[in-house]
Amino acid sequence: LTIGFLAAGNVLQGRLLATRPQPEVSVSEALISRGSDEIVLDIRYPAVSGLHDAALEQALNESIRAQVDAAADAAEAEAAALWQEAETEGFAPWIYVFHTDYEAYCTRGILSLRVTTALDNGGVGFPHTVYYNIDIARSRRLCLDDLFASGGYRETLSAYIKRQISGNPRFFADEFTGITGRTAFFVRGGRLYIAFAKYEIASGMTGEPVFAIPSRLLHGRLRPEYAGLFR
């Protein structure tokens, strides 16, 4: 059983965790740091350059920036509401802290980006991760279905995940209905990982569950262009 958890406050610093996919493709880091009496924002997110398809590159970078901006705006609004309530009700407010971080992996021409936003509001916190997967050579963004020759793989992978969580009280095994063609995933080190949001299939203390899929479950099910991707 290989399950990983990405919890608020335990997000790795952004870095490219493999050899660059091609000499001309790179992942740089954008940094934003600002603060007020109400909230501190500590933001880092990836910016991709060098893709053959300029339109894809622009759309990818705009999607990442939109994710970060939307989460930061929501965090600032929540902090402002707290301070307004504190002034009205006469209690001492606290400072919110908003983090954004990322990881980048490359496996045989597949670039996977993992961008996490998280707000520390004095409670349990709620990280939110979006995964971006790019086939560099074919200049296209991938969803899970794109890797497979047919939809039959969903039942196999869903059954595997169901076995891993059954009997574990942290997981909602009875409520897990299986994966879809757009379930979040990433590729790292020749392995396929299926990812879920906090509270999606498990209790909050579990964080964001991640399942490493055995390569034996993928053999014979992948599209020809991805048949050699996993080991």
Image: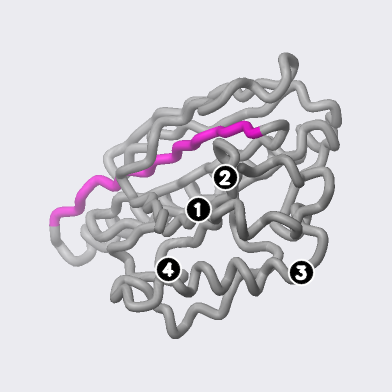
Residue at 74% x, 71% y is 152
Mark 3: which amino acid?
Answer: Gly
Which residue occupies the foreground of this view, 213 or 31? 213
Question: Which of the two labelled residues, at mark 1 and mark 3, occupies the earlier sequence position?
Answer: 3
Mark 4 → mark 3, Cα distance in angstroms? 21 Å
Where does the image place residue 44, in percent across and percent down from the top left? Answer: 47, 31
Q: Report the colour scheme.
A: one colour
**Which residue position holds label 1?**
212
- Which range is magenta? 92-107
> Which residue reaches farthest top?
23
Callout 3: 10 Å neighbours few (<14), some, many (20+)? some
Pointer 2 and pointer 4: residues touching (CB < 8 Å)? no
C-alpha separation, residue under disc 1 versus residue under disc 2: 7 Å
Pick the front one: 203 or 66:
203
User: What's under tag 1, amino acid-wise?
Assistant: Ala
**86 relative to 178, above or below:** above
Q: Main secondary structure of the magenta part?
A: strand
Position of residue 11 in the picture relative to residue 49 (left or right): left
Provide the residue designation for mark 2. 191
Q: Mark 4 points at which residue?
A: 164
Residue visible at 37% across and 73% down?
171
How far, Cα to Cα, is label 1 from label 3? 19 Å
| 218 vs 106, nearest the viewer | 218
Q: Are marks 1 and 3 in contact (CB under 8 Å)?
A: no
Dot 4 falls on a residue whose secondary structure is helix
Describe the element under mark 2 as helix, strand or loop. Answer: strand
Is 102 contained in the magenta span? yes
Placement of 139 over or under 20, stated as above or below: below
Quarter of the image for the C terminus: give it. Answer: top right
Judging by the rendered image, the residue that carries numbered circle 3 is 151
